[in-house]
Image: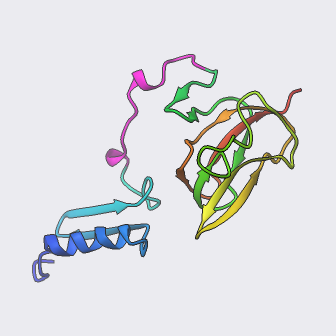
């Protein structure tokens, strides 16, 4: 790689610009022994060395906490129960529009076909149904958060 031209800041900024414009969701550029990885809306999906992954601090997750704990205005940390996975990638919303009542709130009894949120993908709104009947324990993602396919969105207690 000693013959390769060094990467310029303009090239790195172009890469970031492609992310902002929606043309890419993540990218990695390597020059010499340095790798720059950028991602839009979450962690990179490619494999990374264990040493480069952030380690959560013990204060962030107290030992023995099993009940849902508020994390931000709209999110709840994962809890026991059946996860409701994201059926597609996109942006998760708990209501049909800003200021509208949410489709479901923590503590609601839900049927498998009940809509608990929507995922916007390419300006199309796709309903997210509970998938199982039970009591909605809480949400694992914040309103307006980008989500990946299969990512838990909410948790439902089926033992009613």
160 on left or right of 10: right
Q: So how many labels did they put on this image?
A: 0
Q: Is residue 102 above or below residue 47?
A: above
Identify the image quadrant of the C terminus: top right
Which quadrant holds residue 127? bottom right
State yes or no: residue 63 in magenta: yes
- For image coordinates 56% across by 36% down, the residue present is 75
Q: Which percent across, then down, holds residue 113?
A: 86, 49
Q: Is residue 102 above or below residue 127?
A: above
Report the front residue among 58 and 92. 92
- For image coordinates 43% across by 71% down, the residue present is 22
Q: Is residue 50 above or below residue 160?
A: below
Identify the image quadrant of the N terminus: bottom left
- For image coordinates 51% across by 30% down, the residue present is 71
Which quadrant holds residue 159? top right
- For image coordinates 65% across by 54% down, the residue present is 150
Report the front residue among 8 and 142. 142
Q: Which percent across, then down, holds residue 147?
A: 56, 54
Q: Is residue 97 above or below residue 111?
A: below
* Magenta-drawn segment: 50-65
């Amino acid at each position: 790689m000693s013959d390769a031209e060094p990467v310029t800041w303009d090239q790195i900024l172009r890469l970031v610009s492609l992310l902002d414009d929606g043309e890419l969701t993540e990218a990695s550029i390597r020059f010499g022994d340095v790798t720059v990885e950028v991602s839009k809306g979450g962690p990179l999906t490619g494999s990374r060395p264990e040493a480069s992954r952030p380690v959560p601090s013990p204060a962030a997750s107290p030992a023995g906490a099993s009940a849902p704990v508020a994390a931000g205005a709209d999110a709840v940390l994962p809890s026991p129960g059946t996860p409701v996975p994201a059926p597609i990638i996109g942006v998760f919303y708990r209501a049909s529009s800003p200021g509208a009542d949410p489709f479901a709130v923590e503590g609601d009894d839900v049927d498998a076909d009940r809509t608990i949120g929507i995922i916007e993908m390419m300006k199309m709104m796709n309903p997210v149904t509970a998938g199982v009947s039970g009591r909605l324990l809480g949400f694992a993602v914040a309103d307006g958060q980008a989500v990946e396919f299969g990512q838990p969105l909410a948790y439902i207690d089926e033992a009613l």
